[in-house]
Amino acid sequence: MAFPHRPDAPELPDFSMLKRLARDQLIYLLEQLPGKKDLFIEADLMSPLDRIANVSILKQHEVDKLYKVENKPALSSNEQLCFLVRPRIKNMRYIASLVNADKLAGRTRKYKVIFSPQKFYACEMVLEEEGIYGDVSCDEWAFSLLPLDVDLLSMELPEFFRDYFLEGDQRWINTVAQALHLLSTLYGPFPNCYGIGRCAKMAYELWRNLEEEEDGETKGRRPEIGHIFLLDRDVDFVTALCSQVVYEGLVDDTFRIKCGSVDFGPEVTSSDKSLKVLLNAEDKVFNEIRNEHFSNVFGFLSQKARNLQAQYDRRRGMDIKQMKNFVSQELKGLKQEHRLLSLHIGACESIMKKKTKQDFQELIKTEHALLEGFNIRESTSYIEEHIDRQVSPIESLRLMCLLSITENGLIPKDYRSLKTQYLQSYGPEHLLTFSNLRRAGLLTEQAPGDTLTAVESKVSKLVTDKAAGKITDAFSSLAKRSNFRAISKKLNLIPRVDGEYDLKVPRDMAYVFGGAYVPLSCRIIEQVLERRSWQGLDEVVRLLNCSDFAFTDMTKEDKASSESLRLILVVFLGGCTFSEISALRFLGREKVRCWRRSP
Amino acid sequence: MNRTKGDEEEYWNSSKFKAFTFDDEDDELSQLKESKRAVNSLRDFVDDDDDDDLERVSWSGEPVGSISWSIRETAGNSGSTHEGREQLKSRNSFSSYAQLPKPTSTYSLSSFFRGRTRPGSFQSLSDALSDTPAKSYAPELGRPKGEYRDYSNDWSPSDTVRRLRKGKVCSLERFRSLQDKLQLLEEAVSMHDGNVITAVLIFLKRTLSKEILFRELEVRQVALRHLIHFLKEIGDQKLLLDLFRFLDRTEELALSHYREHLNIQDPDKRKEFLKTCVGLPFSAEDSAHIQDHYTLLERQIIIEGTFSSPVNLKKTFKIPDKQYVLTALAARAKLRAWNDVDALFTTKNWLGYTKKRAPIGFHRVVEILHKNNAPVQILQEYVNLVEDVDTKLNLATKFKCHDVVIDTYRDLKDRQQLLAYRSKVDKGSAEEEKIDALLSSSQIRWKN
């Protein structure tokens, strides 16, 4: 079942270099504060840090004790304190309270704040306001890209989505540009660049600026990555809103994969303790099932279990010498496989139990109906019931958003009634949630009547106009219609299937959604790469509201060897799902080799 | 969207999605269980005495030696006695980690700080620092920030924002005329870096009156969004509300004020705060929700009173029938209050006859009851109320309500099905007897 690597697949660049680079930079920064020191680490940075360093490395550089940054007074008695944090205001307030408490007690210590991946002026302003600017020294740890797997990089910035797509804050664009710059410095220039979305375009422009300022660095380097594709998350919200049915996606939906690892509880480990498990290509069992539709996974696991049994059984007829060989050479591998196998079987069992309980089948049917535009009334009342039964606050919202985006907004009557029931089921304070979702364009109300479309187009023109006058956010979100139905038709996202869709031998990327839907984001990427441009996709781009934000830049194609041209880096600005990663892996096997990353 | 009925049926019945169902508990789970048994049977052989290839994991599940683990250790011990701390010290000391693998990297730090080549030649740290002309990733490292401070007043707006983007300290004081300030802002916006835009805004906020600042930002949407987010983050609620007022964004103003209630823990204070929200310029529908929220808190505070009967709450908050029934049903079923469940669906007509009615459909009622582990007798009663015969049979079979299944086949006069069902009930059970009695009955005119 596992897809064999194509013999002619291009080799992936060595991303472990990014880890070593980050670790060495951190060590360098720690050495800037010589002597014993206590290190305060922000919770969100702990897992990424664990991936590149361990306690012994920190100890070697005279870190004495480790603390978590949390809202508690520090008990540290060390003379030197070092803080490793994301550039967030609340962290500055915490540090300020600590330093000011020391001052009040007449105590002098050395303080150092290391911002990762960069510092913000707003943070420095808070330090200044709190009267501790100058008492603390600041540094930056440009740890912006963490390799989670051989073909996956992450910026580990969960706030990227909210900051940009909800608040319109462009603070992370420079971080993206810096990360691209780092990649092009390490792995050569990118001969072909494509992108879609406002954020993508800005990040691209800022990155080009950066390259121009420091030109000469990548010139003459042989490119390792042939294409880079930048894509804004809001170009395709639909895919991110669908229930995942490939194994890795289901594990994520059920247990949450964080920073490439998952916490399997006692119900999975069939023991009394939880286990933190790394999920990547090194887990041989996982690697073979991660991209598979869930229905294929059981068969695979039971086959694997039988094989394992047979391997163990072989020892029965062995003489001493053979047994010795077996124990010294094979046993370790078998044990490892045994451990992994029982974990994934446990995970499958747990997923099955949960999903069966939640009427997953009915949920998926509703999602498919929404994607195809069938039975809207029936789906709406399913969602209503979902809310009333208080199945899950987040799932209810997900369904409402899916309905909204596929239908260009909810009918006002439905919007009101669903919202009211939601607030009654899950709490009135969620009217703030609704306001946020509306601003992000995820859950909107249809404008009544046709008359408004004329106004809308006028408004949308004004909004893109720099000299636009008094136009509120409400209007700008109104101007953005999702047009999903038309896009779906144009790009053929719902495959016409005669008979049964064979999930064991997928024929297109739709397999990641049980054969019902080709992820829009991945389809766009596929189409553009096929054409090597946006040519012929004008209508799609217009429907995506991205007429001003779709770009291509092909500069040095002639220089690149054909080998490297086939390597593609896809950058999802605002995050991506495991279903999309699986779909792109499929595309890579079919056409070219792909890999991708997300902030 | 407007497909025909036929199409729809085809859709719902199409085989496309039947390849795998999550309802198919029996098949899939039994396969899994089988695999599990096979794997577990190997356990005696693969005992856990040596975990050479397993990660060393602490009680909390974190790998021993990982940073997360270590932090938890510190946190767990930090409040303890002196001995505890001493112990902790030795545990956290470098020696106890000596058995952990050393970093495998052989690359030196300096080789990474240069962008020119792939690490091949290893230079020492000092080499890297003295070698200033080399492009470095971290040019700031190692040199005090002060060196970058520059007192030149000649930076153009575009040079200034470029320096800001690089994180260099750069005085903005020379931008004193409004025109200069706005030019600086526009440069920042056209460079796209939000951090720089905010830096300029912090300067403008300090050096312009708020009326002028607001007026200029109103026509600069990107900068305006940055200011709003900045004010939210630093918690300058007063200026934020002033800004919304100036922009005439009344709804955002109201929501922003309402948001503050989330920070109030004390229920009485919270209620008082919500009272101040009631008159705010929300949209019409939100106004009603806010009013409800306030009323709800009022009720919660006097929850013991008679005002809080479910029916009363339903009336006050205009809870739709469906929602009310679903909520009440699940709640009563959890308490196993079957009489209440019964009352929920019983309606009386004007002649005093009672009738069972469920706005959510009895199939849904059955499912909810089953999820709450209702006994078969109760389930049976509601399965019987399902109108559609196929649905009824499905549910009755699924939940093993034998009597319903048997009676239904009897009513359908379906001898074949009844015969088939006989194999599904326990041997010698009352159900089997009942089936046998029916099959041998001469009263029934079977259709097959």
Image: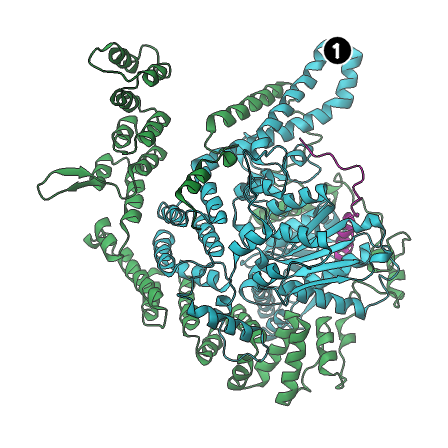
Q: Is residue B100 magenta?
A: no
The C terminus of chain B appears in which quarter of the rendering?
top left
Residue at image location 70% in from the left, 11% down from the top: A316
Image side of residue A89 versus residue B289, left or right: right
Residue at image location 76% in from the left, 55% down from the top: A27
Q: Quadrant of residue A138?
A: bottom right
Location of residue A524 with respect to A298 vertically, above or below: below
Q: Quadrant of residue B392?
A: top left
- Neighbours of disc 1 within 10 Å: few (<14), some (14-19), many (20+): few
Please state which of residues B348 and B246 is positioned toward the viewer in this rendering: B348
Residue at image location 17% in from the left, 38% down from the top: B355
Image side of residue A383 versus residue B162, left or right: left
Q: Quadrant of residue A155?
A: bottom right
Task: Specify start and end residues of the magenta stretch as a single range.
Answer: A1-27
- Give x and y (percent) for residue B375: 30, 28
Amino acid on which the number 1 mark rests in the picture? Met
Image side of residue A414 versus residue A95, left or right: left
- Give x and y (percent) for residue B399: 35, 27
Q: Is residue A4 magenta?
A: yes
Image side of residue B159 versus residue A46, left or right: right
- Give x and y (percent) for residue B7: 44, 42
Camera sees residue B60: no
Q: Which chain is green?
A: B
Residue at image location 55% in from the left, 78% down from the top: A468
- Give x and y (percent) for residue A90: 56, 64
Camera sees residue A475: yes
Q: Which chain is cyan?
A: A
The residue singled out by tag 1 in the image is: A318
Location of residue B415 with respect to A218 vertically, above or below: above
